[in-house]
Every structure is written in C-alpha cells, then in structure tokens.
Image: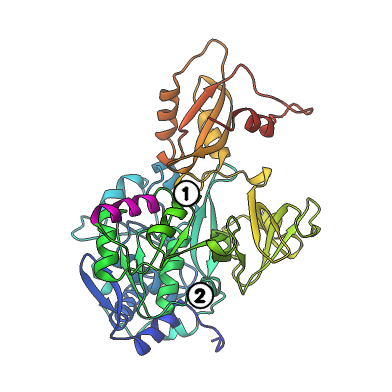
Amino acid sequence: MDIRSFGLHDAIARNALVHGARTALVFEGQLTTHAEYAARVAQLAAGLAAAGVGRGDRVAILAQNCPEYLDLFGAVASLGAILVPINWRLSAEEVAYIVGDVAPKLLVAADEFKSLLPARLEGVTCYGFGGQQAPWRTLESLYAGDAGAPKELAAAVSDDAGVVIIHTAAVGGRPRGALLSHRGLMLAAMQTQLAWGLTPKDVNLGVLPLFHVAAIGFWLATQLAGGSTLLLTRFDPAALVRHIDADGGSLIGTFPPMLGALLDAAAAQGSALAHLRIVSGIDAPETLQRLRTVCPHTRFWSAYGQTETSGWVSMAPFDECPGSAGRPAGLNRVAIVDDLDQEVPLGETGEIVVRGPLVFQGYWRLDEDNAFTFRNGWHHTGDMGRLDAEGYLWYSGRSPAKELIKPGGENVYPAEVERTLLEHPAIAEAVVIGVPDAQWGEAIKAVCVLQPGQSVAAEALIEFVGTRIARYKKPKHVVFVPQLPKDASGRIDRAAVKAAHGGL
C-alpha cells in the first residue's frame, strides 16, 4: 500500500465526503450526486471483481457517452485494472485490431455498435445494456453484490499504475495504445482546475466523446472541483444553447465546426450564453473574434497537448498571446530540440519534447516505439514548434516522421490512409496530405498515381477508403498525377508533393 498515492478512486471517495449532496452527473434529465456516483462505482467494482477482473486486466467499452461509461472508469480504477475506450467511429477492421491488441478480459458494448465487433470473442466476457441474449450478459447485473469488497483492493492501487489505454492515430498504419496512469490524468486535471478556477458551481458540457483524452480531462477537472458534468450523446447546437442557459453550462471543449454552430444557434435563440465562461480547443481566428464579440464574458483558451501527455502541456487565454499555444503548464518541462536532440536557442524551430509526471507510461506492447519516443530522457511528441523569450509555445506543424491531419479535431495519420488507397487495384502510388478547410479546419487530400491501363473515379476511390477505415479518415479531395516527385534515393519527396498540392 502506497500511503502517498492519490488515484482516481481516491478523488471519487473524497468527493462523496466533501461534495456528497452536490450533483456530479446529469444525463437525460436524471441527476446523480457525488455520493450516489461513489456508491454506483463501488457496486460495479464489486461486480467486476466477482467476474474475475483484477489488477492489470483490460476492460473495453464501445458506447456513446452515458453514466455507465463513467461508472466503469471509476470501478476499473479502484481495482487496478485498465479501461480501454474504443472509438465507435472506427471501422470493424480497426475495432477488431484494438480488441486483439489489448485482449480484454471483459467488454461492454452498446447494441448499435455490436456489428463493429469480431464475430468471435474468445476469452472475453461480453456485457450489453438492457435485455441481452446469450452469450451477452446484462451490464446491470454487475451492480449487484457486496460493495465493500473492493475497498482493500482500491487502497493498494498505486497512482503510478496504468488506468486507461487510448489508441492514438495510426502513425505506421496501425493504431498505438497509449497507457495513461492515474497520476498523469489526476495531475493534468489539477492543472486545468487551477488554471480555469473551477469550483463546485461549474458545469462541464460533456459533448466530446469519452474515448478522447480531452473529454476525460474536462470531466476529471470538473470532478476534482466538485462540479458536475452534463453528459451528452451527440452535438446538437440548439440543445447545447438550452443547456447553457437552463443548466448553467460553464465550460466546453470544441473542435471545428462546433463553436461556429453553437454561436449560430445562440443567435437564432436570442441567447447571450451568459453562463458559458470557458471554451477550449481549436478554431479559426474569425470564429474566435465572433465569440469575443458575442460573448465578451467567455474566454477561449489555446492549448497544446496530446493523448501521450494526459492532456494539456501548455495553455493560456487566446487573447493573452494570439496564435500561440500558451505557456508550459505548471507540471511540465517543455523544450525544443534539433535532429540530434540538442536544445535549440529561443525562437528557433525544432521538435517539441516534454518531461514530467503527465507523460504516459508508453505504447502498449511496443517496446521499440517506446525506446524511440522516450530517448535521451524526454518524451518526443513528433510535433514541431518554438519557444519565445516569454515562454510561449508556438506550434508549427508535425515532424516529417509523424505527419498528422486533424479534420474536425480527429487525428489521422497519412500512412494509414495511404495503405488503404494502395489496396485498390487501380492505385500504384499515393501520398496523403492535409489541406486547409473552412468547415473542418483541415481536410484530407490524396495525390495518386494510377496503375498502367487502370482508371477509377475520385468519388469511387473516396468511398473505397470509407468502407475500410473510419469514414472521417477518407479523403475529401483526390487528384491523379502522372508521377510523384522522388528524392535522390528514389523515395517519394513528400515535401515536394505538399508544396505542389497543398492548396485546393
């Protein structure tokens, strides 16, 4: 037992004592207090333990935002097990890969997503919501039993233990599972709570899906403050305006085009979004100017972070230094290094590297990747940037080894899309790049060379990709060229492709 640990389960128990009667969760009009949430977590933990879930076991969930999702998070944490949230926007092939990668002992899935799962799940006990038919069992049945049984287990769980595996975008053609610890997530949440001055009166508008580290971070930061989270299953701008006005929604995470749509809905309803005081994410300068004009009481926070850093590495109000990603947060050491891992002078661009307790424990079962990522005592983010004399971080793109496209805030690595394009019999070569997009912030563009004597329509090729991987990863634009530029070694010159085709 580590008397100096403080994990997610400890925060839940502390809130039950300090904020027990206050609302912790709202879902479809049903309110759950912090005390009730702690009781639900304890009951579910007892049921999971009785089902054989123990320390280090993986429990996967494939579902939209719901109270059971957060119950499962707390219950797994108290047992020293590991939650694996699965992105329901992925294809069946991608979901099957993740399930095979983590080999869960237990899996929870909503009915609408069961078709994404492999037909055979050997060694996995499967639970669903509501009435179920064998071999599926009912999740509700796990809430029965002696809720006091897991207490000794929870006391023995170190905050250095892994608690969640989130699969990041497929840098090498396959997603990598990032293992995050209690400590990393809790300290990331504490940073956010302190920076935003969150209190028990704050209401987190939980519209981001809980398979994203940003959604988990918003929930945990509000949880630590004793506030409440209003869980939503989908982004509905008109409904969000009503929730902000009627339920006191005070903070929200957004990705393009969410904020613009929210402002449109507010204008249509004549709302000033009076309770909304914090927005954070990514958006265009013109949208942020509109927010500033319509909601002068609301602050948009710019930030830089990634799944591997458990949340924000740097943050600041956008207006404090427009265009920057803020300053390194209190528990992060950030540096900029060159190709030899030597720190570069202030103002020069290089790779962003991070050190501190928020850094993840590593990629699941990928020792070589971990050795490369953690070389020379730093977590290498694969992102490029610079630090100025006042300590502000300026993000300037991805390193060539980790080129990344973010349509609507989702992470898409070109290698995965290129691999899928090359599966089409008409495609000989393909390069995928990101291009500016007014609606989504960034869009996917494929530059392709056809096989001799072959042809395929751009629309057909786009749909081909969309049937094999998540549809948000399919190209929005396709161009065909006679040949792709090559460097002296005969490899495709990606920089030259981007320079020639980076516009629309």
Residue 474 against residue 44 in the figure, above or below = above
Q: Is residue 403 visible?
A: yes
Residue stretch rendered in magenta on the structure: 258-269
Asked if residue 41 lies in the magenta stretch, the reply is no
N-terminal of the two: label 1 or label 2? 2
Please identify the residue farthest to the left as the structure is shown: 131
In the picture provided, is 130 more to the left or to the right than 125?
left
Q: Identify the disc placed on residue 115.
A: none
Eyeballing the image, is 27 above or below 262? below
Above-or-below relation of 366 to 37: above
Residue 260 drawn in magenta: yes
Which residue in the protein does label 2 denote? 186
Q: Position of residue 60 (x, y in %)?
A: 40, 60
Query: How many numbered marks appear?
Result: 2
Q: Nearer the viewer, residue 378 or 274?
A: 274
- Left or right, 360 with respect to 50, comes to right
Quadrant for the N terminus in the image: bottom right
Q: Amino acid at mark 1?
A: Glu
Q: Residue at x 46, y 18 (%)?
A: 456
